[in-house]
Image: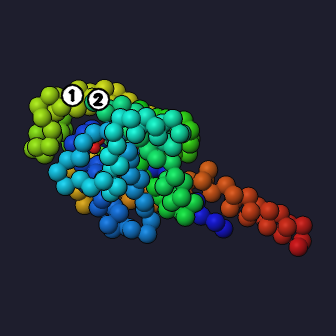
Amino acid sequence: MEKQGILIVVSGFSGAGKGTIMKELLKRYPDQYALSVSATTRGPRPGEVDGTDYFFRTREQFEEMIAQDELIEYAQYVNNYYGTPKSYVQEQLSKGKDVILEIEIQGALKVKEKFPDTMLLFVSTPSAQILKERLVGRGTEDEATIHARLARAVQESEGIENYDYFVINDELSECVENVHALIRCEHNRVSRNINFINHIREDLSGFSKGE
Ligand code: 5GP
């Protein structure tokens, strides 16, 4: 029976370590997962590579992608656009890979609306204080941006009930295995196996007729 991958959206406060968790998940299970690469108008951080971390685009280029309907969803986050290109996601899902979108909450809700069987996962730090320390310690944002991102975290925390799963990123390795286990479980939901179940039902009804 042909296998279709699951679409998984991972959100979490800026600085919660989503990116690190996802990279590690892909390193450990490269055959199972594909990570979607988003387009953004924000500038690259040191070490970020165009086409790997993000597709870095100008505002005009981004608006052109919107106009051409090339994005599954897009949102504004602290003065920049972020969006998910359609083509890669569709291609990987049809290859049977579980595709992970690491996106903020507005985008997450739009994806869920379009594709209701999307799995939504929220990643948190063990405490608010640790979140602030990680964001400051990363040293990639100026003070005003850190402040805006923390304010955004307050807003995002209000929306966590919309998610299916909640994980705390305390010890990285443990958190990665936890996320992997949740996704494995998700594959076994009755609603995701309904074609197979109907197939078995049909075969069984053949037996009861004495076939
Ligand atoms: P950062 O600038 O820290 O890389 O990302 C800022 C926020 O934008 C994060 O919460 C990240 O998950 C989110 N984000 C990244 N890509 C996308 C996307 O394609 N769509 C949406 N809606 N949010 C995104």
Q: Is residue 94 left or right of residue 55?
A: right
Q: Is residue 150 left or right of residue 208?
A: left
Callout 2 crowding tier (Cα within 10 Å): few <14, some 14–19, many ≥20? few
In the rendered image, which quarter is residue 166 located in? Answer: top left
Q: Residue at x 52, y 52 (%)?
A: 87
Q: Residue at x 73, y 58 (%)?
A: 198
In the rendered image, is residue 63 in sight? yes
Q: Position of residue 13 (x, y in %)?
A: 27, 38
Q: Earlier in the sequence, mark 2 or mark 1?
A: 2
Q: Secondary structure at mark 2?
A: loop
Give the labeled residue for mark 2: 79
Callout 1 crowding tier (Cα within 10 Å): few <14, some 14–19, many ≥20? few
Tag count in the figure?
A: 2
Q: Amino acid at mark 1?
A: Ala
Q: Is residue 33 left or right of residue 191?
A: left
Name, please, the residue furthest toward the bottom.
Answer: 211
In the rendered image, which quarter is residue 32 located in? Answer: bottom left
Residue 148's disc is 1
Q: Judge depth for marks 2 and 1 and give the one in front.
A: 2
Q: Amino acid at mark 2?
A: Asn
Q: Position of residue 211 (x, y in %)?
A: 88, 73
Q: Is residue 9 left or right of residue 126?
A: right
State the residue in front, 211 or 179.
179
Where is the N terminus found, in terms of image quarters?
A: bottom right
Q: Residue at x 43, y 62 (%)?
A: 33
| Circle 2/circle 1 CB separation < 8 Å | yes
Residue 56's disc is none
Q: Position of residue 133 (x, y in %)?
A: 11, 40
Q: Secondary structure at mark 1?
A: helix
